[in-house]
């Protein structure tokens, strides 16, 4: 009997403190950049975002999302066999944030690993979970999480902080003999590895007093990403995934894209012939939550009745580096 990975429950979490665009506009007006917030709002559709307490780490965001997903699944932390956590804003360079979460969650039996593909992390992690379930009879409950706190790794005077919101999303994945996980496809281009990132603190450039003072241990946009990376790349991924798994855009009930720019989502939906109402967005409310945005949007769509039992859902993520991944699932 086949062991097909199936999402049996989802959850998401955002902190309590809401940061409006008006609040950020005051900050950047004082910094002599009054036009920044209005320009970014018009381009992205983001109206607000949420910040966690300053003493929280990424694992603290992941914990309530994990608890919610497990509770909805009727599972306990000690039932979890494997935790896969996607983030590019880890608690530490090492150890893995998933190990920190495992301890906080009390999932004593679970193995763990991190996926570091930025916004492509969740569809990549979901595909990884499907592979483990298909090939390992002892793995029956996998907790897949995306979590993001890039705001704490940014210079608060950098206009790019407009985009960053804190949050986490989670899914409980278990084997079934009915359609669940359908397939995945991926794409990358390391030529853009120097475009956006944190460039000091690893082995290429260990952190020094000078690199800290110059801001190289903080996240920075170094050069502009061409919009066609997503506007052409996402349709290409969708077409490949659909062709490889024998479905069409008319078969799809929702496509969840990386939640950074509403205009891009609408452009891509139009290109692939997807009605815009089938491309659920949350960036208006939660800002850009990076590695967490796809599972957060997935759970939000489920809670709003936009994704129901039997629906075919495609998730397409695009992360710095760059990584891109598209994964299709049939909801149980």
Image: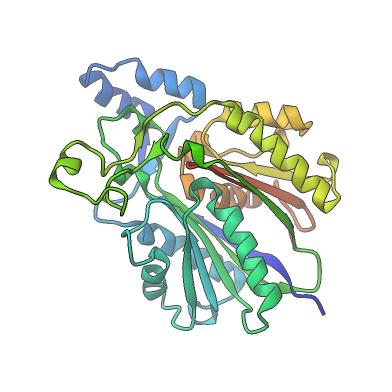
In-image side of 245 versus 173 (left or right): right
Up the image or down, 29 lies above or below 159; here it is above
Q: Position of residue 230 (x, y in %)?
A: 60, 33
Q: Position of residue 87 (x, y in %)?
A: 44, 54
Q: Residue at x 38, y 64 (%)?
A: 97
Q: Position of residue 59 (x, y in %)?
A: 37, 61
Q: Is residue 327 visible?
A: no
Q: Is residue 199 visible?
A: yes
Residue closest to the eye, 22 or 221: 221
Q: Residue at x 48, y 41 (%)?
A: 320
Q: Residue at x 51, y 42 (%)?
A: 190
- Colouring: rainbow
In-image side of 25 versus 39 (left or right): left
Residue closest to the eye, 200 or 72: 200
- For the C terminus, the image quarter is bottom right
Residue closest to the eye, 317 or 70: 317
Residue at the limit of the structure toward the left, as seen here: 209
Q: Residue at x 31, y 54 (%)?
A: 203
Up the image or down, 36 lies above or below 154; here it is above
Up the image or down, 99 lies above or below 24; here it is below
Quarter of the figure with residue 18: top left
Quarter of the figure with residue 330: bottom right
In-image side of 8 versus 297 (left or right): right
In-image side of 216 versus 197 (left or right): left
Q: Position of residue 117 (x, y in %)?
A: 50, 51
- For the N terminus, the image quarter is bottom right
């Amino acid at each position: 009997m086949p062991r097909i990975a199936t999402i049996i429950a989802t959850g998401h979490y955002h902190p309590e403190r809401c940061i409006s665009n008006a609040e950020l506009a005051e900050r950047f007006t004082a910094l002599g950049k009054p036009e920044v917030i209005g320009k970014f709002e018009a381009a992205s559709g983001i109206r607000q975002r949420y910040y966690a307490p300053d003493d929280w780490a990424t694992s603290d965001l992941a914990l309530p999302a994990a608890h919610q997903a497990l509770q909805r699944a009727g599972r306990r932390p000690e039932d979890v066999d494997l935790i896969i956590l996607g983030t590019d804003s880890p608690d530490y360079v090492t150890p893995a944030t998933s190990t920190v979460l495992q301890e906080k969650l009390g999932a004593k039996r679970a193995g763990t690993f991190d996926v570091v593909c930025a916004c492509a992390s969740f569809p990549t992690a979901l595909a990884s979970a499907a592979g483990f379930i298909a090939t390992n009879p002892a793995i029956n409950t996998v907790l897949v999480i995306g979590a993001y706190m890039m705001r704490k790794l940014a210079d608060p005077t950098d206009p790019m902080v407009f985009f960053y919101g804190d949050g986490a999303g989670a899914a409980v994945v278990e084997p079934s003999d009915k359609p669940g996980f359908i397939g995945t496809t991926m794409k990358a281009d390391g030529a853009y590895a120097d475009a956006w990132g944190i460039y000091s603190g690893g082995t290429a450039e260990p952190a020094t007093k000078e690199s800290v003072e110059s801001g190289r241990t903080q996240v920075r946009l170094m050069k502009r990403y061409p919009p066609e990376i997503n506007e052409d790349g996402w349709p290409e991924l969708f077409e490949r995934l659909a062709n490889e798994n024998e479905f069409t855009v008319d078969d799809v009930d929702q496509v969840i894209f990386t939640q950074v720019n509403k205009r891009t989502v609408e452009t891509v939906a139009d290109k692939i012939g997807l009605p815009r109402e089938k491309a659920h967005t949350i960036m208006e409310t939660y800002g850009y939550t990076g590695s967490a945005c796809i599972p957060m949007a997935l759970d939000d769509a489920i809670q709003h009745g936009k994704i129901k039992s039997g629906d075919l859902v495609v998730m397409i993520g695009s992360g710095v580096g760059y990584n891109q991944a598209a994964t299709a699932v049939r909801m149980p």
